[in-house]
Image: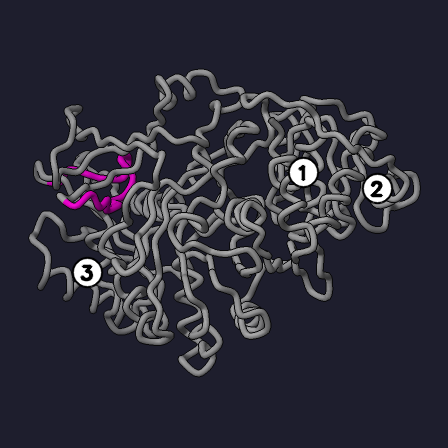
C-alpha cells in the first residue's frame, strides 16, 4: 500500500476529484489537480536522482507546493521530512547529518537566510530551490515543470518508511521519529468519528505542517474525507486567523491553548466570526479550565482537547463533544489501547496517577539512530509516553504532567499544573508555569514562573497570596519569578528546562 495513493489514487479521485482540497490565498486546488502535482513531484524527484527509500528534507512554507512535494515523496517511495522553517543553520545541519537526506528542497526565501547550509548542499549536489533559484542551483519549480508524470505509485509495503517527524526539542536535540505508509491510514479519525465532518467541509489549523498535529488535521485528515484545508503560508497571527475564519467559515478549527489565549485578548467583538464554527480543538499543551470557560462565554462553543504525540502521529485521546470542561483530556479513540503504570511500578487504579502507555495503529517504528531510547520506550507494540494521567470510573483520562516533572515534596506527589491553575486568573497574571528544582540541600522544591500583563511585583504578590490561601504547605512554591515571555518550542510547548536554567544561573551568581 502507498500512503499517497490512499489519499489521491484512483478510488479517492472517483469520490472527490472535483472537490476543493486546498485553499491558500488566491489558490484553489481541487483533488484532481493536487494529484497531478503529486505525480509530477514524483517525476521531479526521479530526475534529481532520488530513489525509493531516500530521505528528502523539505524546508518550505505551508503552501500547496509543500503539500505536493510531501505527498510526492510518498508516491515515489521516498521519505518526506518536513521541517520547521524557523530553525537556524546549525539545526538544519544536524537534521541533514542525522537523517542522511539525499536531497533538500528549500524555498527561495528560506534559502536566502541559510547561505552556508545551501552552499554545502550545493557542493554535494543535494539541493533544489523552490521558487526563484539562484544561478547554478537546480530549480525545483523547473524540474516539476519538465518532469514526466509518475502515473503509478511506488508499491510500498505497510511497514516501509514514509515520513519522519522531528520532535520539537523541549529538552535538547530533536529526535527523528520514523513513520510508515500504514500510519497514513488512521489520519483524520477525529474528523470522521468524533465530529463526523463531511466531504466539502473546511478546516483551519494554526499549527504548521511540519508538526504532527498540523500534518494530520491540516492536510492528511481532511484529504482522507474529501474536505478542504485552508492553509496559511506564513506563521499565523491572530488578526490573520480571524480574517481567514470570517472568509472561509470552517466547520473545524484546530489550534493550541496559547493561541486561544491570544485570540481571547482581542475581545468578543473581534471573535464574532468564530461563532459560526461548529468544532474547536486544542492540543500541544494542557488546556486550562479558565481558557475553556472564557472561550465558551465569548463564542458559545466548547474546545475539545486532543492528545497525541509525534510517536503516534495521530490523535490518541479526544474529548467527546458535550463533555468539555477543561478538567479532563478525554477518552481513547477506537482502535487505541491505553494502560497506566503507577509511578511506583504497579498498574494504576482508578484515580491513581500513572504513566501512560499506548498501543496505536499509527505508532512509529522508533527513533532514528537511537537504539537504546527506542528499546526503552517502544516495547512489544506499546509506547511509553512518559506523560502522567489519571483515569476515572467513566473512562476519562486527565493529563497530570510529565513523569519527569512530577515531584515528591515532603513524601507526597505534587503535579505542577495544580499550582499553575491556582494562580491563573489572578490580576496581572497571563500565564504560569511551575517546574521542580532541587534546593541547596538537595530537596526537591517548586518554582513558579509568571508571564504578566501588569506590574511584576504585584503579580508575584498575588500568586503568593493565592497559593497560601488555597494550597497545603508542601505544594506551595519556594521561588516565584516573572519573565517577559515563556520560552517555547516552534510548536508552542513550554521549554521548562530553560526556566530551570534561569534559577540555576541566579543561584550560581549568589554563590
Question: Sequence-wise, which precedes: disc 1 or disc 2?
Answer: 1
Looking at the picture, tell me which residue is in the foreground, 426 or 359: 359
The residue tagged with tag 1: helix, strand or loop? loop
The residue tagged with tag 2: helix, strand or loop? helix
- Judge whether residue 60 is colored magenta: no
To which residue does mark 1 refer?
9
Residue numbers of the magenta segment = 394-409
Instruction: Bin the neighbour count of mark 1 within 10 Å (Cα to Cα): few under 14, some 14-19, many 20 and up.
Output: many
Instruction: Bin the neighbour count of mark 3 within 10 Å (Cα to Cα): few under 14, some 14-19, many 20 and up.
Output: some
Give the quarter of the figure containing the N terminus. top right
To which residue does mark 3 refer?
422
Q: Is residue 120 visible?
A: no
| Residue 107: image location, x then y, percent | 75, 47
Q: CA distance from mark 1 to mark 2?
A: 19 Å
Q: CA distance from mark 1 to mark 3?
A: 52 Å
Give the quarter of the figure containing the C terminus. top left
Of discs 1 and 2, which sits in the foreground?
1
Q: CA distance from mark 2 to mark 3?
A: 55 Å
Amino acid at each position: 500500500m502507498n500512503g499517497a495513493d490512499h489519499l489521491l489514487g484512483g478510488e479517492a479521485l472517483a469520490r472527490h476529484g472535483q472537490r476543493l482540497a486546498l485553499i491558500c490565498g488566491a489558490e484553489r486546488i481541487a483533488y484532481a489537480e493536487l494529484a497531478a502535482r503529486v505525480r509530477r513531484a514524483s517525476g521531479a524527484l526521479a530526475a534529481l536522482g532520488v530513489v525509493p527509500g531516500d530521505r528528502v528534507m523539505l524546508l518550505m512554507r505551508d503552501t500547496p507546493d509543500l503539500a505536493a512535494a510531501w505527498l510526492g515523496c510518498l508516491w515515489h517511495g521516498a521519505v518526506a521530512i518536513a521541517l520547521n522553517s524557523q530553525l537556524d543553520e546549525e539545526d538544519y545541519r544536524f537534521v541533514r547529518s542525522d537523517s542522511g537526506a539525499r536531497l533538500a528542497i528549500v524555498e527561495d526565501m528560506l534559502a536566502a537566510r541559510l547561505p552556508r547550509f545551501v552552499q554545502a548542499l550545493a557542493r554535494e549536489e543535494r539541493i533544489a530551490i523552490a521558487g526563484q533559484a539562484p544561478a547554478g542551483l537546480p530549480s525545483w519549480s523547473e524540474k516539476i515543470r519538465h518532469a514526466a508524470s509518475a502515473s503509478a505509485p511506488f508499491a510500498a509495503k505497510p511497514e516501509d518508511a514514509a515520513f519522519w517527524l522531528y520532535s520539537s526539542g523541549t529538552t535538547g536535540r530533536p529526535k527523528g521519529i520514523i513513520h510508515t505508509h500504514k500510519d497514513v491510514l488512521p489520519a483524520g479519525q477525529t474528523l470522521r468519528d468524533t465530529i463526523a465532518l463531511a466531504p466539502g467541509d473546511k478546516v483551519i489549523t494554526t499549527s504548521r505542517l511540519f508538526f504532527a498535529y498540523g500534518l494530520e488535521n491540516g492536510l492528511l485528515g481532511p484529504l482522507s474525507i474529501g474536505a478542504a484545508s485552508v492553509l496559511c503560508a506564513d506563521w499565523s497571527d491572530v488578526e490573520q486567523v480571524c480574517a481567514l475564519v470570517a472568509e472561509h467559515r470552517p466547520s473545524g478549527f484546530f489550534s493550541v491553548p496559547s493561541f486561544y489565549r491570544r485570540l481571547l485578548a482581542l475581545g468578543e467583538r473581534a471573535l464574532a466570526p468564530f461563532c459560526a464554527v461548529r468544532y474547536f480543538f486544542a492540543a500541544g499543551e494542557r488546556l486550562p479550565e479558565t481558557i475553556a470557560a472564557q472561550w465558551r462565554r465569548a463564542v458559545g462553543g466548547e474546545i475539545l482537547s486532543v492528545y497525541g504525540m509525534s510517536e503516534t502521529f495521530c490523535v490518541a485521546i479526544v474529548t467527546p463533544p458535550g463533555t468539555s470542561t477543561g478538567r479532563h483530556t478525554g477518552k481513547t479513540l477506537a482502535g487505541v489501547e491505553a494502560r497506566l503504570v503507577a509511578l511506583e511500578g504497579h498498574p494504576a487504579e482508578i484515580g491513581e496517577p500513572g504513566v501512560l502507555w499506548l498501543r496505536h495503529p499509527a505508532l512509529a517504528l522508533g527513533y532514528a539512530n537511537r537504539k537504546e531510547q527506542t528499546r526503552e520506550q517502544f516495547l512489544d507494540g506499546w509506547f511509553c509516553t512518559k506523560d502522567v494521567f489519571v483515569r476515572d470510573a467513566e473512562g476519562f483520562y486527565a493529563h497530570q504532567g510529565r513523569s519527569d516533572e512530577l515531584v515528591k515534596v515532603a513524601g507526597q506527589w505534587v503535579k505542577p499544573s495544580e499550582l499553575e491553575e491556582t494562580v491563573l486568573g489572578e490580576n496581572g497574571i497571563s500565564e504560569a508555569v511551575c517546574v521542580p528544582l532541587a534546593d541547596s540541600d538537595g530537596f526537591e522544591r517548586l518554582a513558579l514562573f509568571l508571564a504578566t500583563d501588569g506590574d511584576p511585583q504585584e503579580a508575584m504578590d498575588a500568586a503568593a497570596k493565592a497559593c497560601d490561601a488555597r494550597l497545603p504547605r508542601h505544594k506551595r512554591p519556594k521561588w516565584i519569578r516573572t519573565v517577559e515571555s515563556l520560552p517555547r518550542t516552534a510548536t508552542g510547548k513550554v521549554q521548562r528546562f530553560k526556566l530551570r536554567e534561569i534559577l540555576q544561573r541566579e543561584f550560581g551568581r549568589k554563590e
